[in-house]
Image (cartoon, rainbow, N blue to C red):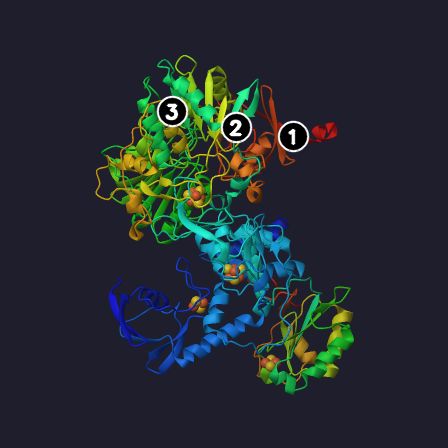
Amino acid sequence: MSEVVNLNVNGIDIQSDSKKLLIEACEDSGIHIPRFCWHKRLDPVGMCRMCLVEIETPRGKMLVPSCTTQISDEMIVDTESDVVKKAQEGVLEFLLINHPLDCPICDKAGECPLQDQTMAYGPGESRFVEEKRHFEKPISISEIILLDRERCILCARCTRFSDEISGDPLIEFIQRGNKTEVNTFPNEPFKSYFSGNTVQICPVGALTSTSYRFKARPWDLKSTRSTCNGCPMGCSTELNSSQNKMLRILGVDNDSVNQGWLCDKGRYNFEYLNSETRIKTPLKKLNNNFEEVEMQEVYSEISELIKNENTKVNFYLGSNLTNEDFVAFREFANSISNNDNKFYLNDDVLFQGFFNEDVELGKIDDLNNSDAIVIWAEDLKERLPVLYLRVRQAVKNGVKLIVFGHTNRTLDDVAEIFYSDEVVSENFEIIKDLTKLEDFKSLIVEKNVTAIIGKSTPQQSDSSINKLFDFLNSNSNLKILNAFTKGNTYGAFQILDNLKGTKDFVNEINSENTDLLFVVAADPIGRSIYSKQVKKVFDEIKTVVSLDNFKHETSELADVIVPISSTLGEKNGTFTNIEFRTSRIDKLVPSPGQTVSDWEFITSLMNFSGLSNNSYSLEELNTKAFEDLDIELKPYFDNLDKPSNLDGIINRTTPKIATSSSDSEKVNFFIGEKLYGDSVTERNSESISLLGAKKFIEMNQETVDKFKLSSGNCLLEQDNLEINVSYTVNNILPKGTIYIPTNRRELNKFDFSKKIMITPSRVKEALNVN
Amino acid sequence: MSWDKTLLKQAGEIIELYPQKRSALGPLLHLAQSKDGYISDDSISVISELLGITEVQVKSVSTFYSMYKQEPTGKYLISVCKSISCEINNSTEVIDKVQEFTGLNNNETDEDGLFSFEAVECIGACGGAPAMQVNYETVEGINAENVFSLCSWLKESAPEVIVADEMQENFGGIKSFDWAIQDNTGATSTAPGFQTLKTSKVKK
Ligand code: SF4
Ligand code: SF4
Ligand code: FES
Ligand code: FES
């Protein structure tokens, strides 16, 4: 048990928790001790010795590393004595022996702990004349990360991160003594979804990212705090720009959410903002060609349609909008005279979720505080990456993890129990009597359980997850995190009632009930598994207005494209994450050309059409979003901007989701999305554009043999569609089951309710033809 | 996987000995060393798969310890101590002699793959300085003349098993202390001879 202890640091009495390390206790009391290797989210190692301080011991004063020393009662500490100063100078002198001092050409210069601490604590003069050690200047250890081993001070932050936090230790110290270097295994690159974090925590410029290299100096950067809208985790970020260009995204340590970490997609998927191909002027289709028009023309044409009482309007919304955008759409829909309008979210997997009075909704922090975590959802590592880190962290703290199904196989190494095909069938039904799973029961019955439940794949039946939910709910003290996986889904839930998904859209929408369709920041034809059906719907509808950043398969079918600002850095607003925590989305760079925020466009359109007399301000929309909430502290801008609320405000609502439930479909494959795909923003973000380019499928070895595959490639065929893909062996998949990542180019174009043929590849012939 | 069935079976037995698989890393590296005379990237992949850790983690350990060789060694690894006790008892002459005989600089292997030579830090036989090892089997009280004969003997009779006692008797001098019972077990490769690893053999 922890208790409060008293200690004396530099003659000042302080109090702290006995579990704390000396460096932390001092930090909490405002006494800064220099350090390189210690990082509050990593286990201490005492590698660098920069944090040496003197403590009184029975044998007199002693130098100890404060990052590995646990405090105790009546400890007497000196962090500023002459001996400590001498030690710090000595340590720095050693660290600089082999340091190249390339500050003038180093990306880290200006925000470099080595530079700063040498200034503050260093000896001031160098005594070294010897040649320093040399390594090949930066080597790329992955497509997005470079390593300059000469600059490395061997603090082990990067290697500890990859081992302790992300669980993919693909970098390590190689060699020993003064030959030590960080490196990967030959031909085994640092392919981690979290590699950008190592760049951020490296205390020198040894690790750099391709996207930021040589782009700016820290003192030239403008920055603001914001929230990543890449997935419902809503990680806290710091956006950096220079000369009005977004250049970098850093993770901010939000204790309840991301604890400083980001996934690489959240971190690097921003370069599209500056893409040449972005739409910057309104486009209107004339004789099948888009022509640039004035915004005024767009407003007047669409408002004509809206003014007509008979025009039936519906909405297909992307999940990357802000809450205020959603409010604007809601107000707009409510004020149209023909107001039987419906909202569809750009989500193939949307399900009803577990939201009612009997359900206790969980927080992310509950993961750490429960006895067990139960997961049955899409692959968290691919879809909610930082939540995946939080799960791993909870397990490290002793929480037991139970994983169902074959989607979350990357949690297999830390799971207490991993139920694959003996319990979960290939079409994601539980085939065992849960009451007979003794191991499972012993971990959950009457225990505090946090469950992350969602549909593993669009084809999974609702009843299967309901079954697991019911069992947990009646046998344990359950808190639930619904695993929806797209952008600001929870914000949409809070603001729009009766939301539906893409499947409902294709079943319900047709020319009879829709004359005017708004498609907002969504590319269902390019991305959805219902691509074909969506296209059919679009072809039928008289007027389709697309609000988007780019021309893509969907916006190209529209009659009008309105260029919009990106939610990333180009507009202000709020975002609501998986635990209904609302935090700020902030604007840092100007929105290019004639782009407008979605809410601006919609509220102006309302004005034009005479639906409202005054145009809404962003603040009004923000108020409207949350005014009905029954909580004291509402996530209004004013409140969120207070320093104490920067981490966001939790505001739970009970959403009404109207998507129809689905039965499971018997299929020989299951589908999901990988973190990196082929979306238009990724294609236009140079650094990461190739990461999602590979087309592949996964199956187990037996299945590979069954289809007589051997070359590493195979051919998928259905009707007229033939796609060459490579295959990877994944032995956790049940026999005969094939996993298809549908966010890889063209792989979403199959009809997944029908059979897909797999045959050995005909690559050779194809090559001959070329 | 490029380890044959016997080796894999042996690896399995070693892993069994530990409550955590990962603890078998050291012994498995010795096993790899005994197979190839060095730790090949291929062996690293095999070991990483057997232990469920990444290849670079195995590489990290294997490059940390100097007894796991990163380059192929010859059949006989000659290690002469260069630390203080041996140094003041003329180990330099011994080193010179070995270099003269084999034509090797420190940490080199000859073209025929017969000898590797290294000058090493204290091998814990200071009482019998100067001391040296062949495939980690120790000889104490060596001198320039005897080491020459030792090398000639290795070259000419090419023994399969290197036994410390045998070398001591034929080429050694003063010992630090009496090693007690005569032991005919010796090393069969450039990995230390351990019975549990089957890297040792009894010389008939
Ligand atoms: S690369 Fe950076 S983080 Fe990694 S050990 Fe070197 S200095 Fe530390
Ligand atoms: S986990 Fe989600 S919210 Fe966090 S950085 Fe990645 S995409 Fe953004
Ligand atoms: S910070 Fe304490 S040893 Fe590095
Ligand atoms: S100094 Fe040579 S064995 Fe110790």
Structural distance between the alpha carbons of marks 1 and 3: 57 Å
Q: Where residue B80 appears, x then y in whole percent? A: 66, 77
- In the image, residue A271 sits, relative to residue B74, either above or below, namely above
| Badge 2 amino acid | Gly
N-terminal label among 1 and 3: 3
Q: The numbered mark 1 sits on a residue in which chain?
A: A
Residue, disc 3: A608
Q: The numbered mark 2 sits on a residue in which chain?
A: A
Asked whether residue A474 appears in the rendered view, the answer is yes
**Who is closer to the viewer here, A587 or B131?**
A587
Asked if marks 1 and 3 touch (Cβ < 8 Å), the reply is no
**Mark 1 or 3, which is nearer the eye?**
3
The crowding category of the residue bearing disc 3, from other C-alpha atoms within 10 Å (few below 14, some 14 to 19, many at least 20), is many
Left or right: residue A280 versus residue A575 is right
Q: Where residue A428 appears, x then y in whole percent? A: 41, 30
Q: Quadrant of residue A634?
A: top left
Asked if marks 3 and 2 touch (Cβ < 8 Å), the reply is no
Tell me the element at label 1: loop
N-terminal label among 3 and 2: 2
Q: Are marks 2 and 1 on the same chain?
A: yes
Structural distance between the alpha carbons of marks 2 and 1: 25 Å
| Badge 1 amino acid | Ser
**Mark 3 or 2, which is nearer the eye?**
3
Residue, disc 1: A761
**Within 8 Å of ligand 2, the CB of disc 3?**
no
N-terminal label among 2 and 1: 2
